[in-house]
Amino acid sequence: MDEAYRILFIVILFCLGAGILFALIRAIRGPRTADRIMGVNMIGTLSLLSIAVIALLFSESWLLDVSLIYGLISFLAVIALVKTHMAGHKKEKEEDGDA
């Protein structure tokens, strides 16, 4: 039974890796800034899940703490990106109204 779980976790890690690859493509290609921010957020979430699966695979509980911290940092990074994007969008809107 342990071997079945090990194979399952490895398959899950490959699927998460493919998801990270597709999210990276979305983050690079865009076409809008919101799509890029969503891609970065997806990469953070899928990385968090990958760390959690690795914690289960190797039975290392401290990796779950690492994944929680990584999730918080990823969340703060996305909030900073959104705030920067919104400030730039607001500034562009004001400039268009003045012209």
Image: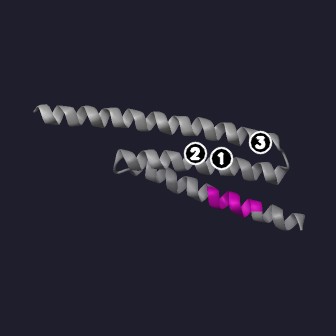
Q: Is residue 8 left or right of residue 35?
A: right
Q: Amino acid at mark 2?
A: Gly
Q: Amino acid at mark 3?
A: Leu
Horizontal and vertical percent position of residue 89: 29, 37
Residue drawn at x 51%, y 56% as measured from the top left: 22
Magenta-tinted stretch: 9-16
> What residue would you read off at disc 3?
63
**Is the C-beta separation of discs 1 and 2 under 8 Å?**
yes
Residue 20 inside the magenta-drawn segment: no
Query: Which numbered disc covers residue 44?
Result: 2
> What residue would you read off at disc 1?
48
Q: Residues within 10 Å of mark 2 (few under 14, many from 20)?
A: many
Q: Amino acid at mark 1?
A: Leu
Q: Residue furthest left?
A: 99
**Is the C-beta separation of discs 1 and 3 under 8 Å?**
no
Q: Residues within 10 Å of mark 1 (few under 14, many from 20)?
A: many
**Which one is nearer the viewer's eye here, 55 or 90?**
90
Q: Residues within 10 Å of mark 3 (few under 14, many from 20)?
A: some
